[in-house]
Amino acid sequence: MTKIATLTLNPALDVSTRTDKVRPTHKLRCEDPRYEPGGGGINVARVVHALGGDVTAVFPCGAGSGATFEKLLRDTGVPIAPVPIAGATRESFTVDETESDQQYRFVLPGPTLAAAELDQLLHAVTRIDPAPGYVVASGSLPPGCDPSVFHTLCGLCGEVGARLVIDTSGPALAALEGGCAWLIKPSLRELQELVGRELDGDAEQLAAASELRDRGFAEVVVVSLGERGALLVAEGTELRMPAIEVPPGSAVGAGDSMVAGLTLALAAEKRLEDVLRYGIAAGAAALLTPGTELTRREDVERLYSAACSSGAAQNRS
């Protein structure tokens, strides 16, 4: 089985709870909180592990809630490679309003990493044994982190023969231009920001994804379209697939679950059509779980099998 490593530069202890209604200035009586280790790459690692993949999670472990974070992650069974840092591990807070079924998500910035700490984190990926075939860097960057950090990571991945999958946003995503990643997964909004124009239809969206590939962002570009599915562009291949319809639920971790599904399918050497289908199934399965709970394997396999049976895809290879 091909090894997968994840790198999370800004992990968070996710705290989730429920209350009847969110009102300003009021004391909001909440249900018992749920605590889970989170952050883009952490979520990807948890989903890959839940789906039966071989994965190791690399992350900075700080003071404060860091010990709780590490214990919770160990309890999930995910193999880990924590790197100690001086700052405190951040927390994120999610509140489900039961009266409206709305969800409120509060995200804190996290600690600033010293140059030596960042260097240790990047090199920790190369010290994993056996060497990973895929490295997933996912999530936001810590405050003050140079957006070009993933170019350094790309070089290190090349040293161990790993393909780099990146799911990020903002300046870090824009900085990928010029040949950094094997696969990226922007949203439609992020795709529009990168190409600098509105994208109204299928043809325009596929053309824009191809433009990112031509500009050296990645060999494979997957654009998540939410309730309208996703598209994939690679050399000689253009695919578009509809979303898998599931009952509405918590969207926490849906994007990370999709990245996990995509990467695991790539590691299993599936056809690109099945890679996209499995990623969509993993993302949809995340909507079936409450709060910050992530994807369940039985849900992914069921949704993927149903999608394979329907064969719903537009292939423009």
Image: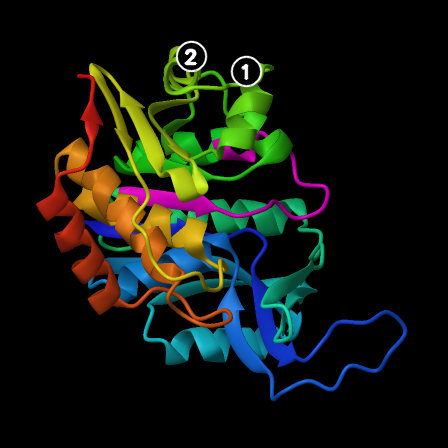
**Left or right of residue 181, residue 282 in this image:** left
Pointer 2 with pointer 1, Cβ within 8 A: yes
Q: Residues within 10 Å of mark 2 (few under 14, many from 20)?
A: some
Residue 217 drawn above or below residue 214: below
Q: Is residue 249 magenta?
A: no
Residue 145 lies, in percent from the top left, at 66, 40
Q: Residue at x 63, y 87 (%)?
A: 31
Q: Which residue is mark 1?
A: 195
Q: Is residue 146 magenta?
A: yes
Does residue 131 show up? Answer: no
Residues under labels 2 and 1: Cα distance? 8 Å
Residue 283 drawn above or below residue 225: below
Which residue in the rendered view is the most extreme toward the left?
A: 309
Which residue in the rendered view is the most extreme toward the right?
A: 25
Residue 245 drawn above or below residue 51: above
Q: Which residue is mark 2?
A: 211
Q: Residue at x 17, y 17 (%)?
A: 317
Does residue 285 show up? Answer: yes
Residue 11 lies, in percent from the top left, at 56, 59
Magenta extent: 134-150
Residue 175 lies, in percent from the top left, at 57, 25
**Left or right of residue 148, residue 237 in this image:** left
**Left or right of residue 14, residue 25 in this image:** right
Residue placed most toward the observer, 291 or 20: 20
Q: Earlier in the sequence, mark 2 or mark 1?
A: 1
Q: SS at mark 1?
A: helix
